[in-house]
Image: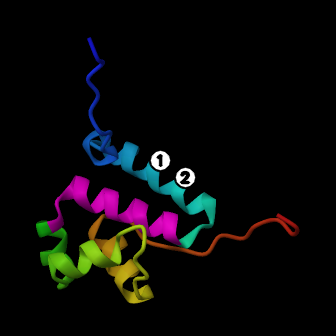
Amino acid sequence: MPLKTSRFDAAAVLDTPEAIEAFLEDAFESGDPSFITHALGIVARAKGMSQLAEETGLSRQALYKALSAEGRPEFSTVLKVASALGFRLHPERVAEGA
């Protein structure tokens, strides 16, 4: 009998503020803009895209497009999304050569 599998959806397990924060920290540590954008999209789905659209003033369709793995959102969109998710971006000094 073949093994039944289902597609893993990270949004389904991001059910606490701590899980979301750890997920986003990992994404930002990657330094990969497309990975970060995709991670923001996953968190947005976990929180509810309709609610996020309302809070940011952007349409759901625009959010889905901007926060996809292929998305290239404007920085203002990233700031709006982060704020609506309860986060803020801030500079952090890194050691030289790191």
Residue 67 position in % (x across, y down): 35, 72
The residue under label 2 is 26
Side of 42 relative to 24 (left or right):
left
Locate the N terminus by quadrant.
Answer: top left
Range of the magenta residues?
34-49
Number of numbered callouts drawn:
2
For the residue pair 24 and 92, the one nearer the viewer reads as 24
Q: Which amino acid lies under the numbered mark 2 shown in the image of this protein?
A: Asp
Q: In this view, does 92 lie above or below 80?
A: above
- Horizontal side, residue 30 vs residue 64: left or right: right
- Marks 1/2 in contact by CB < 8 Å: the verdict is yes
Q: Residue 7 carries which label?
A: none
Q: Residue at x 40, y 77 (%)?
A: 71
Quadrant in the picture for residue 70? bottom left
Predominant SS of the magenta segment: helix
Q: Which amino acid does label 1 sit on?
A: Ala
Q: Which mark is residue 22?
A: 1
Q: Is residue 71 left or right of residue 84?
A: right
Name, please, the residue furthest toward the front: 1
In the rendered view, tell whether residue 29 sits above or below residue 37: above
User: Residue drawn at (40%, 83%), measured in percent from left and top?
Assistant: 73
Q: What is the x, y in percent for residue 3?
A: 30, 18
Image quadrant containing the C terminus = bottom right
Question: Rounded to the nearest whole Å, what is the CA distance between mark 1 and mark 2?
Answer: 6 Å
Q: Is mark 2 on a helix, strand or loop?
A: helix
Q: Which residue ends up furthest to the top in the rendered image? A: 1
Residue at the outermost right position? 97
Residue at 45 percent of width and 50 percent of height: 23
